[in-house]
Image (cartoon, rainbow, N blue to C red):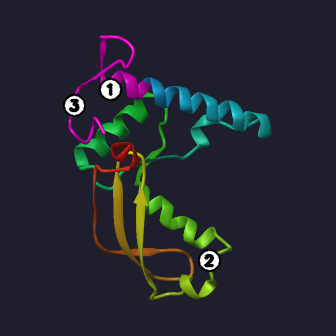
Amino acid sequence: MHLYQKETTIKSSNSSKTLPIRIVIEKILDQLRSICINQLEKSWKDIQASNIKWVVTVPAIWNEYGREFMKECAIEAGMKNIKIALEPEAASLLLFDDSSIDKEYKKKGKIFMLVDAGGYTIDITLNEIMDDKGNLKQLSPPSGNSLGSMIIN
């Protein structure tokens, strides 16, 4: 949420130290990249990092500044083939992969609202199913706010 508010530093929760938020995010993404590659190498010995397509999700309420900032940090962390996706867009893909959802709801022309109530944000999107492959048309811009469950707590 610091990026949503365009803050440039982040304060440690257990000391008075602050760090540039860019360094913190780059280090976190670098560790995540390293863990993922190590796990993948257990199954695919000949996997090459250059063949991995990374998708990092961000809240839909983030503006272009936050999305671009996250993309730059991911690239700096070694995620060269990177795409930034909005969290509700990524969640919408589950609709087509979830066998517990009746096929009737997955047909072309169906409209659905996705409410992604996360820890820090609530994102709402309205989409129409365009075909049987899972292509979606956004019917309204994503909306929401920064009142996720952590704020309620």
Whether residue 135 sits left or right of residue 5 in the image: it is right
Q: Find disc 2 in the rendering and name its residue.
A: 101
Nearest-to-viewer mark from 3 and 1: 3
Q: Which residue is at the front of the view, 25 or 18?
A: 18
Q: Is residue 4 above or below residue 124?
A: above
Q: Residue furthest top?
A: 16
- Quadrant where the N terminus lies? top left
Q: Is residue 22 above or below residue 151?
A: above
- Quadrant where the C terminus lies? top left
Check disc 3 and report its element: helix, strand or loop: loop
Mark sitting earlier along the chain (2/3): 3
Q: Indicate the position of residue 106 as horizontal and vertical percent values.
A: 55, 82
Determine the image quadrant of residue 117.
bottom left
Q: Residue at x 56, y 32 (%)?
A: 33
Residue density around tag 3, few if under 14, some if 14–19, many if 20 or more, within 10 Å? few
Q: Find disc 1 in the rendering and name its residue.
A: 22
What range of the chain is rendered magenta?
1-26
* Marks 1/2: CA–CA distance: 40 Å
Q: Residue at x 40, y 65 (%)?
A: 115
Q: Amino acid at mark 1?
A: Arg
Q: Find disc 3 in the rendering and name its residue.
A: 7
